[in-house]
Image (cartoon, coloured by chain):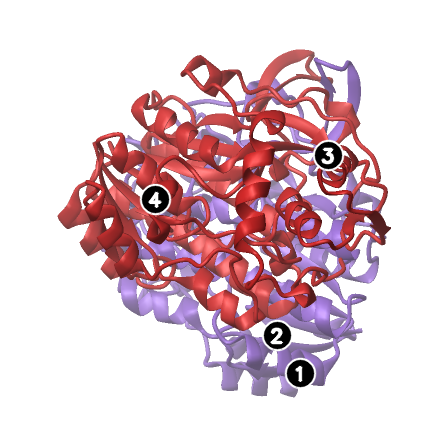
Chain colours: A red, B purple
Amino acid sequence: MRVLVLGGDGFCGWPTTLKLSKAGHDVHIIDNFSRRKIDKELNSNSLTDIASMSDRLQAAYDHDMKLHCADIDIAHNYSALKAYIKALRPHAIVHFAEQRSAPYSMISEIQRRYTVDNNVLSTHNVLNCILDIDPGIHLLHLGTMGVYGYSKDFGRIPEGYLNVKINSTEKDVDILYPTNPGSVYHMTKSLDQILFQFYNKNWGLKITDLHQGICWGTQTEETMLDDRLVNRFDYDGIYGTVLNRFISQAATGNNITVYGTGGQTRAFIHIQDTANCVRLALESPPKKDKVRIFNQVSEVRNVKELAMICSQKYGATIEYIDNPRKELKENKLEVDNAGLCSLGFDPIFLSEALIDDIKFIASNMKNNLDPDNILTSPKW
Amino acid sequence: MRVLVLGGDGFCGWPTTLKLSKAGHDVHIIDNFSRRKIDKELNSNSLTDIASMSDRLQAAYDHDMKLHCADIDIAHNYSALKAYIKALRPHAIVHFAEQRSAPYSMISEIQRRYTVDNNVLSTHNVLNCILDIDPGIHLLHLGTMGVYGYSKDFGRIPEGYLNVKINSTEKDVDILYPTNPGSVYHMTKSLDQILFQFYNKNWGLKITDLHQGICWGTQTEETMLDDRLVNRFDYDGIYGTVLNRFISQAATGNNITVYGTGGQTRAFIHIQDTANCVRLALESPPKKDKVRIFNQVSEVRNVKELAMICSQKYGATIEYIDNPRKELKENKLEVDNAGLCSLGFDPIFLSEALIDDIKFIASNMKNNLDPDNILTSPKW
């Protein structure tokens, strides 16, 4: 298939691009390199030395992957986006082009507003391009488990839709899961859901929303092919996801810093599985009767457990610090992921892959890790 | 109270501004006059001869209402908006500054994108100003009954929150009513709800969301004080609401054009009541534990009934035409409006006020009505 990956330079976008290309798809990237610019803004960096896009494309070419990349700000340059899609005529668009850090979205009004502007307008622009150019283009979007929130009352988290009885009429209906985001970033994915619901209902657009758990790890089969293909690895308090922060703390002899009690239970997925899941969803497009929502998760763990695993590996000390986030101290979590499993998803579990990742990171981090970047989360 | 009205030049904004001022509040307006610009874009016009803002302000002053107006695009000029609010320090902000026509929002990608950009960014900018300047400022926002949709399964429409049983856990919970908007415009009000939910949950902002029915009528006690204070009256297929379109068709000897079977049942409110309800909500601010949602409606009628009332008054013929909108042919509707009633809302009913409005409009329309503007709705 001809596939356009929006945000194909990012942490999830780049390995997914390579995976799709290696699987035989004709893959094109749009990225405005905002993530690299934010590194400069935050004085932060990837622990791995990521290559420039031109070097990435050359390396991909050297390994039989022909990729193309255009630099377009899809939230604010609609005409360029539309012209590109009109010329390319992709069968599917994979949309990763959103600001994806919850802490970043909570720093100040500047980041709150940037996150809403960028994420809502980029999603809405893509929907409008599809509607006007070819309503048959399948849109795959990276959502987040964070749209669900963590209410005890709602039970096991289903895939997007919740079965309820309306008490006033005693009717059973499936409703879009009542959203309860925990940050401005998560909120934008809740806004996306409403956009998808309407564009699907009114015009029948084919949309898959992948509510992903917390992504960890660095490398995939394809990014390991060449040093220039290496994926980014964020260890800082703003962009580093929890397990990646623990891995880098443990491997550098620092304390592992757990927010609050560590009783927060979350869903996790390895970056290799992210790329695999997108491929599976792409190759089995949905019907258009409603938005297809999958939970893109491999397993559920609580934060304390993760800290203990990393601590045991390296003998690092666990330090419990004030939680900068407004969230429940402890929660239970069960998540349905039957949709992707039915398409052939075979999850990589922490117990299998963690050691490889830690080794890889340990060998990369000597020069690049700046300890001042670890406890940088804003408080909210 | 010191009150800032955003969109204070519009159909709901202007009479509300006058009502609040006459009630003794210190009222300030921000408006970018987009509604007047859209008149030019659509080659449309108000049936009444509305005065310029400077003439409106002078006329208000002549009737003991001291108003001020600033021209700021609040969606795209955040720094000007913030500086204004910082200097003014209002106790409350009434937010009417959204593109409010469903048909307009469905014309093409230009209007779809304008409506989302303008409405989401303006609401989010206002929330950010309040959060950064003074989280105690009460935000009153004009929502729409259209966020609810018209499902039979959900019963009588409650005020914002729906009581359901989660079938997997058998727990009873109140959830934000599952939204089901019928146009891009209505969808933006559904997006606003998610913004309000999060900014209230995380920072305790005091927010009242007024889900208004279809507004009809022209004049209020205050707009009748002076010709220069007259409110706008839209009769066209894009901005004219259904009853106002019928009134102007009947009064000019044209056929009354009903979309589809006329079996659509909707909630209605007179413009005078809009202004009154906003005043009531303003003067009784909510607690901050959750977003306060009121249904701002006076009565429920079906479209056919309205057509017959207007037809009987003028002997006009009713003509049933293809419905340009995707909506149910027929629906039942019951709406709770206990919240505003508990604050003293005493609705004006169609049976009382319709004749006055028809007379007023008939005397105004001779020169201004362009018959080509009546059947201009896009199809969706």
Proximity of marks 3 and 4: CB atoms separated by less than 8 Å:
no
Please, what is the three-letter code of the amino acid marked with disc 1?
His
Of residues B206 and A99, which is closer to you in this image?
A: A99
Judge depth for marks 3 and 2 and give the one in front: 3
User: Eyeballing the image, is A16 above or below B260?
Assistant: below
Cα–Cα gap, marks 4 and 1? 49 Å
Quick check: marks 3 and 2 in contact, CB under 8 Å? no
Query: What chain letter is assigned to the residue under label 2?
Result: B
Q: Which residue is mark 4?
A: A127
Vertical placement of residue A239 versus A270, above or below: below
Residues at marks 3 and 2 on the same chain: no
Residue neighbourhood size for the residue with mark 4, other residues' Cα within 10 Å, grouped as few (<14), some (14–19), many (≥20): many
**Quadrant occupied by the C terminus of chain B:** top left
Q: Disc 3 residue type? A: Ile
Instruction: Name the residue tied to disc 2.
Output: B225
Residue B63, label in figure: 1
